Amino acid sequence: MTEPNRAEAFSLESEIALITGGGTGLGFGIASALVACGSRVVLTGRRERVLAEAVSALGPQAAYEVHDINQLTAADSLIPGLDGLRNPNQPLFVGGSVRRRGQSG
């Protein structure tokens, strides 16, 4: 029996990930790892300049949408804007972290 190719075993080539807080820190780290495995990523956050810099660093597999996840009334408008990026039968992964304003850490 031949050993499976590790790169193929962890390939995310047909996947797309929506990553909250993807411009810096943990979110950017998650985005980097997913892109390295072949996934396309869409970063969200409040700071467009930071998101644009992150997408530039990640390359053509990355895009961004300025979006504040603390604005719950705006949440419904985010996903329809991404529909052209994915197959409707394809899972949409959401990663990153959420922190309430004024909360440390």
Image (tube, rainbow, N blue to C red):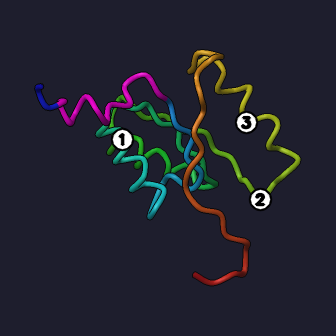
What secondary structure is marked by label 3?
helix
Identity, as a three-letter code, of the amino acid under mark 3: Leu
Q: Give the range drawn in magenta.
A: 4-15
Is residue 82 depicted above or below 30 in this figure? Answer: above
What secondary structure is marked by label 1?
helix
Upstream in sequence: badge 1 or badge 2: 1
Q: Which numbered marker is on residue 70?
A: 2
What secondary structure is marked by label 2?
loop
Name which residue lies at 67% across and 69% down.
99
Q: Position of residue 40 (x, y in %)?
A: 43, 31
Q: Where is residue 80 in the image (x, y as percent from the top left)?
A: 74, 26
Is residue 65 toward the left or the right of residue 37 in the image?
right
Upstream in sequence: badge 3 or badge 2: 2
Identity, as a three-letter code, of the amino acid under mark 2: Asn
Location of mark 3 (residue): 78
Q: Residues within 10 Å of mark 1 (few under 14, many from 20)?
A: few
Is residue 39 depicted above or below 47 in this figure? Answer: above
What is the C-alpha distance between the residues marked 1 and 2?
Answer: 25 Å
Is residue 89 depicted above or below 21 in this figure? Answer: above
Location of mark 1 (residue): 56
